[in-house]
């Protein structure tokens, strides 16, 4: 039997929680320009499964890759790092 690899984890901020058991996370990363060597911010939005509906807008969370849960959801929420103020 082959071992499974580690699932990816990403840290991001909750942008929307208007859906039932789903939140939208915005994850940012820095990318270096190949010619000018300047760092720019790129961001991606992820639809994340939140089973207990405990996330609020502005929370910082860690999400983990999972099997497809719906048409757009491929991530699950692991834990909340910091609550919104």
Image: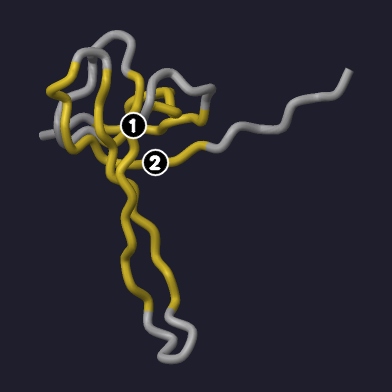
Q: Quadrant of residue 6?
A: top right
Name the residue at the right extreme: 1
* Foreground residue among 34 and 11: 34
Disc tally is 2
Q: Secondary structure at mark 2?
A: strand
Q: Is disc 1 placed on a helix, strand or loop? A: strand
> For the residue carrying disc 1, how many other residues have a C-alpha within 10 Å: few (<14), some (14-19), or many (20+)?
few
Quadrant of the rendering where the N terminus is positioned: top right
| Picture residue at 81% right of the left edge, 24% below the top | 3
Left or right: 42 in relation to 68: left
Name the quadrant containing residue 73: top left
Q: Where is 31 relative to 14, above or below?
A: below
Q: Against 31, is 13 above or below? A: above
64 to 27, vertically: above or below: above
Does the residue at mark 2 contact the one at mark 1 (Cβ under 8 Å)? yes
**Around disc 2, counting alpha carbons within 10 Å, would you say few (fewer than 14), some (14 to 19), or many (20 or more)?**
some
Tell which tag, 2 or 1, sits nearer the viewer.
Answer: 2
Residue in the picture at 17% in, 20% down = 19
- Residue 14, image x, y percentages: 23, 35
Location of residue 47 in the rendering, given as x and y in whole percent from the top left corner: 32, 31
Which residue in the protein does label 1 denote? 81
Q: Residue 12: x, y in percent?
A: 33, 42
69 vs 5, left or right, is left
What residue appears at the point 16 percent right and 32 percent down from the top-left corner?
A: 16
In the image shown, does 54 or 24 lie closer to the viewer? 24
Q: Earlier in the sequence, mark 2 or mark 1?
A: 2
Residue that appears at 10% across and 34% down = 85
Query: For mark 2, what is the residue?
Result: 11
Instruction: Work out how far the residue at label 2 is from the one at label 1, CA to CA, in angstroms.
Output: 9 Å
């Amino acid at each position: 039997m082959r071992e499974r690899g580690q699932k990816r984890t990403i840290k991001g901020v909750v942008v929307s929680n208007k859906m039932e058991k789903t939140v939208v996370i915005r994850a940012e990363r820095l990318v270096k320009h190949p010619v000018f060597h300047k760092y720019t911010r790129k961001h991606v939005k992820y639809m994340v499964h939140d089973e207990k509906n405990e996330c609020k807008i502005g929370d910082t969370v860690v999400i983990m890759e999972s099997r497809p849960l719906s048409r757009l959801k491929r991530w699950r929420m692991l834990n909340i790092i910091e609550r919104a103020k």
